[in-house]
Image (cartoon, helix red, strand yellow):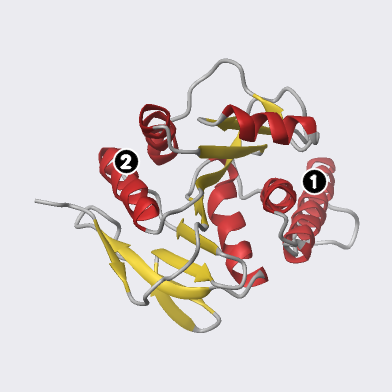
Amino acid sequence: MANIEIHRTETIKLREPTVVLGFPGTGLVGSVAASQLVDALDLKFGGYITSPDFAPLAAIHNYIPLPAARIHYSQKHNLVVILSEMSIPVANSMELADKILAFAKSLHAKSIISIGGISLKEEESAVYVVSTDKGMVKDIVARKLAKPIREGATTGVTGVLLARGALENFPVMTILAEAEQDFVDPKAASKALKVLSEFINTPIDTTELDKEQASIVKSAGEKMIKSKMSKKGPMAGESGMYG
């Protein structure tokens, strides 16, 4: 009996669309990038994904509750976005990957592109690419959009999709931006979206992500200053409390 089900709330009729995935991971890059993609291109809600193993929660956007794992699409941009704002249980990775691949094939999708974060700590602003299609990698590298990964491993839904795509000769690619492991990294999400934008030749506004990054940097700087002041002790006339 199927544990995971994909429910369509709209009839999605597109012509060989690109399917983009964004799931939680390092820096929450996938989820953040996918959410921004939906907002920037004004994608329509087209379905959702359920499983008894998924966390019992709803995501709230613009005052509207939505399933945490859902599908959006755009006829104008010939694009489908599958995103999750909750962690996918490891035990569900294989089945979910199979369901997504079958869903993409039912749409006669041109390719599946996953967005995520990576923490190699080799180059601060680097973006990397891995694909079952050598032509896709060659194109991205030739245009200097991202760097290829020669050796390594990737796990979860994306890892299974890459392996399935290689076995079934289906184009699956993942764009991985260098990201912080310990907190949300909108800068990395913005970098990944810029690569996607160039690759699919579709303008994607990342202004909001850039603003969020600036806010995080400012907040971190203020906390650092306060931390240094607290170590020196309170100044005369001050209570010693900072907030």
Residue 225 vertical placement versus 61 (above, below): above
Where is residue 132 drawn, in percent x and y? 50, 30
Q: Which residue is mark 2?
A: 93
Q: CA distance from mark 1 to mark 2?
A: 39 Å
Q: Which mark is residue 102?
A: none
Q: Specify whether residue 132 is in view.
A: yes
Write down the quadrant of residue 124 in the picture: top right
The residue at 50%/57% (across/down) is 16
Write down the quadrant of residue 157 in the picture: top left
Q: Residues within 10 Å of mark 2 (few under 14, many from 20)?
A: some
Circle 2: element type? helix
Q: Amino acid at mark 1?
A: Met
Q: Which residue is mark 1?
A: 224
Q: Residue furthest bottom?
A: 63
> Split into 4 quadrants, where in the image is the C terminus?
bottom right
Circle 1: element type? helix
Where is residue 227 drawn, in percent x and y? 77, 46
Q: Between residues 213 and 99, which one lies in front from this camera angle?
A: 99
Residue 73 vertical placement versus 114 (above, below): below
The residue at 42%/54% (across/down) is 108
Which sits earlier in the primary sequence, circle 1 or circle 2?
A: 2
Q: Amino acid at mark 2?
A: Ser
Q: Between residues 97 and 89, which one lies in front from this camera angle?
A: 97
Q: Residues within 10 Å of mark 1 (few under 14, many from 20)?
A: few
Q: Between residues 62 and 169, which one lies in front from this camera angle?
A: 169
The residue at 50%/69% (across/down) is 73
